[in-house]
């Protein structure tokens, strides 16, 4: 399909970011830290596209007005610990809690079609106008711990025992609601009404009547869904060093993954929940060897 459009747009963006880090240390072997991060972005955009497509006889003019906010808040707490009296046992751990939001409170799309005399009129097509409201929220909570125990021997042989786990839980909720003005009476088809250049002069209380336009919900059944994932993973690893010449590493990672997504299917005037789930366990072994040549 051939298209040729001229695009004009106005874009305003505001960002607010903040970061706070605190750290405490006991001697040289124990460290505690916390990180807090806040990001917020607001975008206000107006765009007008005008041109032609080979699917239409005359030119079209599409306008979109939207305001979007994106926000992320993350809190992290962790620590690093070295126990020299336990053969230099090392333990690292971290807890993370994040929430992300996206909001589109009032996105407006509408279309004007070119007339034979070169003027433009508000389109009566089904996709001529739409108002939508959208919200999305993501939550991510995770725990992680890693343990390392090095063992050194006098004959040039060294071993490192490593183990750890991570537990992560994610949740998402997303919803969009759509509305459309439908011409149902003579005022909704009046060429003089549709020829007004300002949409506010057309879609106002004067013409939103049984003789003009009616607002109807046009939300799709797929505009709302929920999703959840829970992952539990733990591993064991053996790292062996032979006389600083050969290094052999082997380990096993075990993952348990449980996730589902819930969507909605339109059935008459109501919606029916549709759930798809995946639950599986994976065992992931690995072995590698390295030969150092002097």
Image: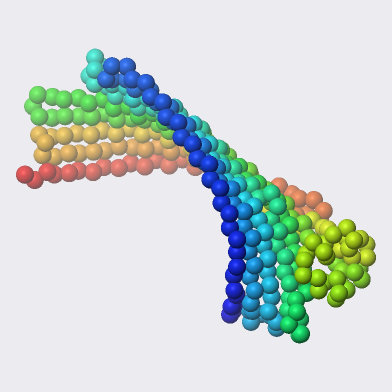
Q: Residue furthest top?
A: 85
Q: In the image, what residue occupies the spot 75% across and 76% down? A: 120
Residue positioned 78% across, 64% down in the render: 199
Colouring used for the render = rainbow
Residue at 64 percent of width and 52 percent of height: 67
The percent coordinates of residue 220 (x first, y second) are 72, 56
- Name of the residue lying farthest toward the bottom: 116
Residue 200 occupies quadrant: bottom right
Identified at 74% across, 49% down, the residue is 272
- Image quadrant containing the C terminus: top left
Query: Where's residue 275, x and y in %?
Result: 65, 46
Residue 156, placed above or below residue 249: above
In the rendered image, the vertical position of residue 28 relative to residue 233, given as above or below: above
Taking the image as drawn, is residue 227 in sight? no
Q: Nearer the viewer, residue 287 or 62?
A: 62
Q: Is residue 199 left or right of residue 60?
A: right
How many marks can you see? 0
Q: Position of residue 102 (x, y in %)?
A: 60, 46
Q: Nearer the viewer, residue 280 or 143?
A: 143
């Amino acid at each position: 399909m051939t298209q040729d459009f001229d695009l004009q747009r106005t874009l305003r963006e505001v960002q607010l970011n903040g970061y706070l880090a605190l750290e405490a240390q006991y001697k040289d072997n124990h460290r505690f830290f916390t990180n807090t991060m806040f990001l917020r972005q607001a975008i206000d955009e107006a765009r007008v596209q005008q041109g032609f497509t080979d699917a239409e006889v005359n030119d079209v003019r599409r306008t979109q007005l939207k305001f979007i906010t994106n926000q992320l808040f993350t809190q992290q707490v962790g620590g690093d610990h070295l126990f020299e009296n336990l053969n230099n046992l090392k333990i690292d751990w971290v807890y993370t809690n994040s929430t992300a939001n996206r909001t589109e409170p009032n996105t407006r799309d509408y279309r004007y079609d070119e007339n034979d005399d070169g003027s433009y009129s508000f389109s009566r097509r089904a996709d001529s106008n739409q108002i939508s409201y959208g919200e999305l929220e993501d939550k991510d909570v995770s725990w992680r711990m890693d343990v390392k125990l090095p063992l050194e021997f006098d004959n040039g042989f060294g071993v490192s025992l490593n183990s750890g786990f991570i537990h992560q839980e994610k949740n998402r909720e997303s919803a969009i609601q759509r509305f459309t003005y439908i011409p149902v009476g003579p005022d909704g088809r009046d060429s003089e009404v549709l020829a007004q250049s300002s949409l506010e002069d057309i879609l106002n209380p004067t013409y939103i009547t049984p003789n003009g336009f009616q607002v109807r919900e046009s939300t799709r059944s797929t505009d709302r869904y929920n999703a959840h994932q829970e992952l539990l993973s733990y591993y064991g690893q053996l790292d062996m060093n032979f006389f600083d010449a050969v290094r052999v590493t082997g380990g096993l990672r075990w993952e348990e993954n449980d996730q589902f997504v819930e969507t909605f299917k339109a059935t008459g005037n109501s919606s029916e929940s549709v759930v798809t789930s995946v639950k599986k366990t994976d065992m992931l072994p690995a072995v590698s060897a390295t030969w150092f040549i002097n």
